[in-house]
């Protein structure tokens, strides 16, 4: 059992931090930045060509981060791989010693920098969770026996801001039934909405630990851009106004993050940070939230 | 021309509750030509349902169930029989199931799987769409096809990327899974949202037609022409 898995299984507050692989092969800077804040987090969550922008893969980067002594959550999306490639990559992840995997559907291809690419979506995220469960049990999708099974700890995503939110609750329940051990949420800015979502999850008897998604806004412009262009992310107008009205955007942005953490950790099991280039400010966010 | 085949009887009956009463609808167009939805098959389905203990309130074959105007007129004349049924069993292609679902506020069970005819697409003048995947899922999705109403073709619920009902991919396009959710709520079948759908068997997609299909359908015309010119 790893540090992150221990915390999840014991319902202790877990902290993960997103790591975005760059476009290109130079990952030295990323590894250094992450290493500096590694003591504050339980695992680095490595994105799989986020927003459908082609980058170095999450499998390789997860492995390199692990080599620096930090636990990872390897993100895997269904956008670019059929069921053969997905299963093979999961076996590869295990061979490389990766412990945790986040099963995602993936953003649509046209949202990224290769809009002419063929969208695959051979499987969806619940089906990918079923695949991970079966590989852990020693069989592939066609029920063929594996020589050596995987031992992957699967997680999945939830979107507390979806409107209507009921279909998300149904889907979360399905994911829990298929073996998801933890959920990380999309970015949250409205603690009240998040609390309502958590109540609905628990009412539906979904007991899987949830990490609340925290994404610092670098500017009001970034918030507006996210609302228009980033799937699943929505920043309420009040929050954008709050940033707009502040003379020190950085300070205000970190304050918003800590406020959301403080108001949500009581009803969930951890925090998932998405610093998006603001890795150096992670210590400050966690300190202000009493988590460092 | 859209080719459809009757599902296995065990699959059809798995959709039905013990005391469900049904109205059986056939299609006198493509499904009749496919031998899966004409008078003969509707009669057979009705007989089998009765024998299995289900109540059949009535049956009808309408030429082209895809033509909603026509279906509306024909069903209006027998609305009492439709009203007294809990649900409808449609012996037709996936488009027929979706079209009837738009007209009647009841669950429409698909009796058929719509089968790929290779690269022959036919013509379809309205908004219902069918990918001819060979394993019809409309039973679980309120008669809306998740392969076509969802941009990503997801089989197990919304991806979470939509905002205010709009798909993340195309502004103005509704989130397909929200449409499915609304429809299931309207027909009081939200319980179906917990059904896990297995990955699709891709080998059934865009396959070339079987030899017997070629000879019994549009391919036969070409074959005759070839024979004549010989």
Image (cartoon, rainbow, N blue to C red):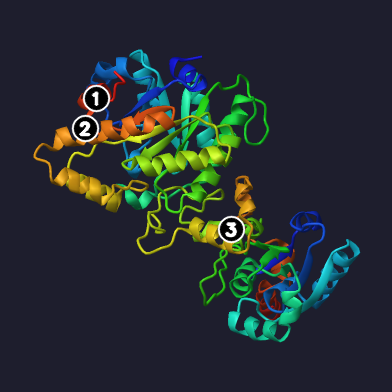
Front residue (pair A280, B110):
A280
Number of the front mark, 2 or 1: 1
**Residue A123 in view of the camera:** no
* Mark 2 residue element: helix
Labels 2 and 1 share a subunit = yes
The chain under label 2 reads A
Height in image: A54 above or below A145? below
Task: From the top left corner, tell me how far across and down residue A237 is, in percent.
Answer: 25, 51
| Quadrant in which residue B133 is drawn | bottom right
Q: Position of residue A225 (x, y in %)?
A: 23, 49
Under circle 1, the secondary element is helix
The residue singled out by tag 2 in the image is A254
Q: Quadrant of the N terminus of chain B?
A: bottom right
B40 vs A134, left or right, is right
Report x, y in % for residue B162: 40, 53
| Residue annotated with mark 1 | A288
Quadrant including the C terminus of chain B: bottom right
The chain carrying label 1 is: A
Tag 3 residue: B206
Q: Residue at x 82, y 60 (%)?
A: B19
At mark 3, the secondary structure is: loop
Q: Nearer the viewer, mark 3 or mark 1?
A: 1
In contact (CB < 8 Å): disc 2 and disc 1: yes
- How far is mark 3 from mark 1, CA to CA? 57 Å
B167 left or right of A180?
left
Crowding at dot 3, Cα within 10 Å, few <14 / some 14-19 / many 20+, comes out as some
Is residue B61 something that shows in the picture? yes
C-alpha distance separating marks 3 and 2: 52 Å
State left or right for residue A125 relative to residue B41. Answer: left
Whether labels 3 and 1 belong to a single chain: the reply is no
Mark 1 Cα within 10 Å, few/some/many (few <14, many 20+)? some
């Amino acid at each position: 059992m790893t540090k992150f898995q221990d915390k999840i299984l014991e319902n202790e507050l877990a902290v993960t931090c997103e790591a975005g692989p760059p476009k290109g092969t130079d990952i030295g800077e990323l590894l250094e930045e992450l290493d500096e804040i590694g003591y504050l987090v339980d695992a680095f969550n490595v994105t799989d060509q986020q927003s459908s922008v082609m980058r170095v893969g999450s499998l390789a980067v997860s492995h390199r981060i692990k080599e620096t002594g930090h636990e990872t959550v390897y993100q895997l999306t269904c956008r670019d791989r059929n069921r053969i490639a997905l299963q093979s990559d999961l076996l590869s992840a295990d061979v490389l010693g990766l412990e945790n995997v986040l099963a995602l559907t993936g953003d649509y291809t046209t949202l990224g920098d290769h809009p002419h690419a063929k969208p695959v979506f051979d499987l969806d995220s619940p089906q990918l969770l079923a695949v991970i469960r079966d590989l852990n049990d020693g069989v592939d999708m066609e029920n063929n026996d594996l020589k050596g099974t995987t031992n992957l700890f699967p997680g999945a995503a939830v979107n507390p801001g979806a409107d209507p939110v009921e279909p998300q609750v149904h889907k979360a329940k399905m994911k829990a039934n298929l073996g998801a051990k933890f959920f990380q949420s999309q970015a949250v800015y409205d603690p009240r909405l998040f609390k309502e979502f958590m109540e609905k999850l628990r009412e539906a008897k979904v007991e899987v630990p949830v990490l609340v998604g925290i994404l610092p806004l670098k500017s009001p412009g970034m918030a507006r851009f996210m609302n228009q262009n980033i799937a699943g992310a929505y920043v309420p107008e009040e929050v954008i106004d709050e940033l707009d009205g502040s003379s020190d955007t950085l300070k205000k942005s970190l304050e918003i993050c800590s406020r959301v953490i403080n108001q949500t950790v009581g009803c969930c099991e951890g925090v998932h940070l998405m610093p998006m280039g603001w890795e150096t400010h992670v210590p400050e966010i966690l300190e202000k939230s009493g988590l460092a | 021309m859209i080719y459809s085949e009757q599902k296995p009887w065990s699959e059809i009956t798995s959709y039905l509750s013990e005391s469900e009463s049904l109205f059986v609808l056939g299609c006198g167009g493509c499904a009749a030509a496919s031998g899966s939805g004409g008078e003969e098959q509707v009669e057979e389905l009705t007989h089998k349902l009765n024998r299995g203990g289900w109540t059949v309130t009535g049956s009808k074959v309408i030429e082209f169930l895809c033509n909603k105007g026509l279906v509306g007129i024909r069903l209006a004349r027998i609305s009492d029989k439709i009203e007294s049924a809990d649900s409808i069993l449609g012996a037709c292609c996936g488009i027929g199931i979706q079209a009837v679902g738009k007209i009647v506020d009841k669950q429409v069970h698909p009796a058929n799987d719509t089968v790929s005819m290779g690269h022959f697409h036919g013509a379809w003048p309205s908004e219902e769409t069918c990918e001819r995947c060979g394993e019809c899922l409309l039973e679980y999705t309120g008669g809306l096809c998740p392969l076509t109403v969802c941009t990503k073709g997801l089989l197990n619920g919304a991806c979470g990327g939509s905002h205010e009902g709009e798909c993340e991919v195309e502004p103005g396009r509704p989130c397909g899974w929200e449409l499915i959710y609304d429809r299931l709520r309207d027909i009081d079948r939200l319980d179906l949202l917990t059904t896990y759908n297995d990955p699709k068997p891709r080998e059934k997609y865009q396959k070339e037609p079987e030899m017997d299909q070629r000879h019994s359908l549009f391919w036969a015309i070409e074959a005759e022409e070839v024979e004549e010119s010989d």
